[in-house]
Amino acid sequence: MSSSTMLDVFKSTGALLDGHFKLTSGRHSNTYFQCAKVLQYPEHLTAVCSKIAEHFANMGVETVISPAIGGIVVGTEVGRQLGVKTIFAERKDGIMTIRRGFSLESNERVLVIEDVITTGGSVAEVIELIKQSGALLVGVGSVVDRSNGRVKLAHDHFSVLSMEVVSFTPEECPLCKKGFPIDAPGSRANR
């Protein structure tokens, strides 16, 4: 699946939104990738995740972990295609943690999967959990990298769609300055 094909899939499923958005990172943008609208279709889920799974297929991945909530669907499908355990990390009292009986073992080979990366904050928190457990980071995979490769979270960082998408701090956002209403469609919308 090429970048232009992937972009067409986002457009055809209504998953590429234009407006004024507060991203999960806290930054603002006029473009929002609503991956869930793409991934609700099994054919797109399978195709997108196969690109990620193919990239990491020969790297000895033992476990896939994703930050909740956006990365869970992608991580589960990548893990299924790789034939490995899939878990997720989630926030408890604002702190990323591994719960629900999930765990990582020392020297376990772990792949982090996310849906959309802007600043990589949630993925960086998951990587810290991997380090704390003594497990080994194999790499990071995502559906969309809004930084066009500027945010590098691992030696092996692969994204199906990588492109430059403008984002602003709230203080510098021209849409805020013009008084446009803001939408926060992400999973941490009330941050």
Image (cartoon, helix red, strand yellow):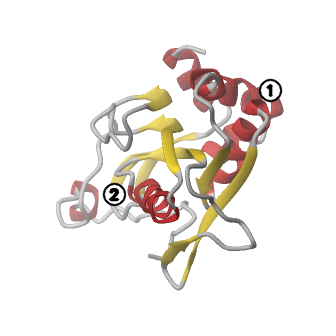
Tell whether label 1 touches label 2 (CB within 8 Å). Answer: no
Crowding near the residue tagged with mark 2, few <14, some 14–19, many ≥20 C-alpha atoms within 10 Å: many
- Image side of residue 147 versus residue 83, left or right: left
Q: Residue at x 70, y 36 (%)?
A: 78
Query: Foreground: 11 or 129?
Result: 129
Res 26 seen here: yes
Q: What label sits on residue 67 in the rendered view?
A: none
Q: Which mark is residue 43?
A: 1
Vertical placement of residue 30 versus 95, above or below = above
Q: Residue furthest bottom?
A: 93
**What secondary structure is found at the residue carrying circle 2?**
strand
Q: Given the image, on which type of amino acid does mark 2 rest?
A: His
| Three-letter code for the amino acid on which mark 1 is drawn | Glu
Residue 17 location, x and y as percent?
A: 51, 43
Distance of label 2 from label 1 (alpha carbons): 31 Å
How packed mark 1 is, by other alpha carbons closer than 10 Å (few <14, some 14-19, many 20 or more), is few
The mark that comes first in sequence, 2 or 1, is: 2
Q: Nearer the viewer, mark 2 or mark 1?
A: 1
Q: Position of residue 32 (x, y in %)?
A: 47, 46
- Compared with 111, 69 (above or below) is below
Residue 158 relative to residue 12: left or right: left
The residue that appears at 32% across and 32% down in the rendered structure is 149
Q: Is residue 101 above or below residue 129?
A: below
Element carrying mark 1: helix
| Residue 12 appears in the rendering | no
Q: Position of residue 115 (x, y in %)?
A: 56, 45
State the image coordinates of residue 34 (x, y, percent, origin top left).
Answer: 58, 46
Residue matched to label 2? 28
**Along the viewing direction, whichever of 151 and 126 lies nearer the viewer:** 126
Residue drawn where x is 58% and y is 30% of the image: 11
